[in-house]
Amino acid sequence: MLEKIILHKHKEVALLKKEISIESLKQKPFFNRKTISFKNAIRNGSGIIAEFKRKSPSKGIINDSVDVIEITQGYASAGASALSVLTDTEFFGGQISDLEIARSYNEIPILRKDFMIDEFQIYRAKASGADLILLIAAVLSPKKCLELAQKAKELNLEILLEIHAEEELEQVKEIAHLVDAVGVNNRNLKTFTVDIEESMRLFDKIQKIKQGSKNDFVVISESGLSEVETVLKLKEKGFQGFLMGEHFMKHQNPAKACKEFIEKL
């Protein structure tokens, strides 16, 4: 599935680059806005990163009768530290317009959640109002990962580097000086199975890299989070952020579910 997604993403980006120039993206109103720090928001708030997601390859349709403004504003009011907005259309039912709308109605950091493989996507993230981008170690070579990270920094965007296995720690070392957050995805991107213990196993190793890099990035846990007890356990370990999508989105009122979760937390 991951190979299928990335193959499609290359075709999609190639087409977009023919239709949209980087110069035109630089003219967009959001392009010159000041970035809201994701790293600071995670440190100073609930740590919950609430995701707007209609569907996924592993679960199919989660919630496709939702309004971007209503949900994202509801998440922000509920006390979420940041928003994550899926912009992949083919596999997750997202749109770049979801990000632009969310940005227009919210004053908390927003992650453009997509499979980033090309600098063009970073320019588009900036032009659409994102504060940070996602780099997934499993789909990028160390060289490409570094190039994209450098471009994000050049555009004053923050970076969330996602890993899901121990062998990807090498990539963390390569760009540890540039990242603002390292996320452990509890869902194996090749098998889609979820294992919360993955976060626990990798945390200490990430901390060692963090100390060596002298860059005080935050460490977050992603996917498969649905219980307050699990988040508290991860918090106790040292995790500062928790990316949650499916758990909130499967409710009829995702914002209410988010509010109740944060209150319990």
Image (cartoon, grey):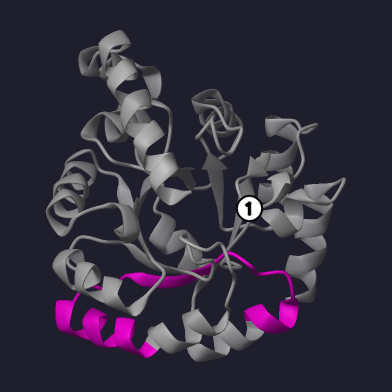
Residue 122: x %, y % from top left: 29, 35
Amino acid carrying mark 1 in the image: Ser
41 versus 166 height, above or below: above
Is 116 covered by the magenta stretch? no
Residue 127: x %, y % from top left: 36, 26
Is 222 covered by the magenta stretch? yes
The segment highlighted magenta reads 204-231
Residue 247 as seen in the image, left or right of residue 126: right
Residue at x-position 36% and y-position 90%: 204
Residue at x-position 40% and y-position 32%: 8
Residue at x-position 49% and y-position 66%: 188
Residue 26: x %, y % from top left: 26, 19
Mark 1, residue position: 58
- Disc 1, SS: loop
- Could you tell me if residue 143 is visible in this image? yes
Residue at x-position 22% and y-position 34%: 119
